[in-house]
Amino acid sequence: MWLKAPNINCIHGFSLRQGGLSEPPFDSLNLGGSEDLPQKIISNRKIALKELGLSTDNLCNLKQVHGNKVNLAKPGQQEGDALVTKEPYLVIAISIADCYPILFYDEVNKVIGGAHAGWRGTVSKIAENTIKEMLKLGAKAENIKVAIGQGICQNKFEVGKEVIEQFEQAGFPSFCWKENKIDLIACNKFVLLQNGIQEKNIWTMNRCTFEEDFFSYRRDNGKTGRMWAVISL
């Protein structure tokens, strides 16, 4: 039901698609979206969080808009693409179905964050903004450990020339793409390293959402469920 990052030792996880109650094509642990039955989604969320020893009572999630706005986490839904907190027991949840989830943890200063990084969020440096907001809460860049979960891999992510041009204009190096295919992991690692995160503190799952274990918006032509990346102090 959940995959874990070896470098983050607080409660966290990246969800798989199995273990829930939803019917096809949202089978079975669908945690979001607007087409599945709402009661199924609510039940799935309770099942998934219980597996981590968490509840929906302190759930902090987002209406994600593919931008770079970072919010201070609070129970309920806010608009933006990242959340940060130093408050214990709050549950940060990032919804995904091809875009990359990025979890952040400063275990020394007890600050966490979660970001939703599709190509738009990546090119506008959502990872950088998340780090900056964590620093305001007392985190130190050299202490922050980062886990990048499942997302669309480079060989499945063809884009138009205009998208590549946006990355070029934003200062991303050319190794982040090959012809018309972007490597979003490489892009986000570049941003992390530029902002003082140590390479040894970055873990990547290196799994593609086109695999059967995951939901994928692109693979399933928009008719699919949603996974979560969750982190809590």
Image (spheres, rainbow, N blue to C red):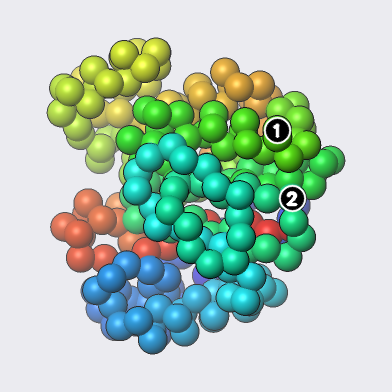
For the point 61% across and 60% down, the residue is 74
Tell me the SS state at disc 1: helix
**Vertical relation: 2 (above or below) 137:** below
**Vertical relation: 232 (above or below) 163:** below
Q: Position of residue 199 (x, y in %)?
A: 64, 25
- Label 1 – label 2 distance at C-alpha: 11 Å
Q: Which residue is mark 2?
A: 86
Residue 9 as seen in the image, left or right of residue 228: right
Q: Which residue is mark 1?
A: 135
Tell me the SS state at disc 2: loop
Give, as a three-letter code, the residue at label 1. Answer: Leu
Question: Looking at the rendering, in which quadrant would you find the C terminus?
Answer: bottom right
Residue 36 as seen in the image, left or right of residue 200: left
Give, as a three-letter code, the residue at label 2. Answer: Lys
- Marks 1 and 2, the one that precedes in the sequence: 2
Q: Position of residue 186 (x, y in %)?
A: 44, 27
For the point 26% across and 56% down, the residue is 217
